[in-house]
Amino acid sequence: MNFPVPLTIVLTAAAATLIASSWLHSSTARSEQRIHDLQAALDVQTDVVAPFLRTFHLGSGMSVHAATFPAFLDEQVQSGKISATDAKAVLAALSAAGQGEPVLTSRGWIMSAIAKGN
């Protein structure tokens, strides 16, 4: 089938525009989701994690030997710095927030989405 050159150019340009538009929409949706995830993680960090650590004077956690936040809490319960009830309460708050658990970084315990964003 032989199409006239102008029609071929128009069809090629339309296909390229459609592909570019699709890619841009997908990229925008991913960016918006990432912003939403970071905001949710920041909310949990400022409303749950930071106040908990500050209330019990647990510092940044840099001297911690635990690899996970629940293990860190267990260490704190064992050392008598916090009660088991307090540990369960913060874990319940984290679970209810649905953002996972904090991870230990060079800055201390921070939410995973924030750590990945650095």
Image: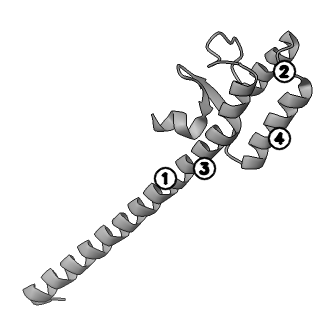
Please give the name of the residue rendered at 65% of the width and 32% of the height, measured from the top-left corner: 50
The answer to the question of whether label 4 and label 2 lie on touching residues, with beta carbons closer than 8 A, is no
40, 34: nearer the viewer: 40
Please give the name of the residue rendered at 86% of the width and 29% of the height, measured from the top-left corner: 86
Q: Position of residue 23 (x, y in %)?
A: 35, 64
The answer to the question of whether label 4 and label 3 lie on touching residues, with beta carbons closer than 8 A, is no
Three-letter residue code for mark 1: Ile
Mark 1 highlights which residue?
Answer: 35
Mark 4 highlights which residue?
Answer: 92
Q: Secondary structure at mark 1?
A: helix
Please give the name of the residue rendered at 74% of the width and 26% of the height, measured from the top-left corner: 55
Q: Secondary structure at mark 4?
A: helix
Quarter-of-image position of residue 71: top right
Distance of mark 4 from mark 3, alpha carbons? 16 Å
Mark 2 highlights which residue?
Answer: 82
From the viewer's perspective, is residue 95 above or below residue 58?
A: below
56, 62: nearer the viewer: 56
61, 14: nearer the viewer: 61
Mark 3 highlights which residue?
Answer: 40
Q: Is residue 110 left or right of residue 90?
A: left
> Which mark is in front, 2 or 3?
2
Three-letter residue code for mark 2: Ile
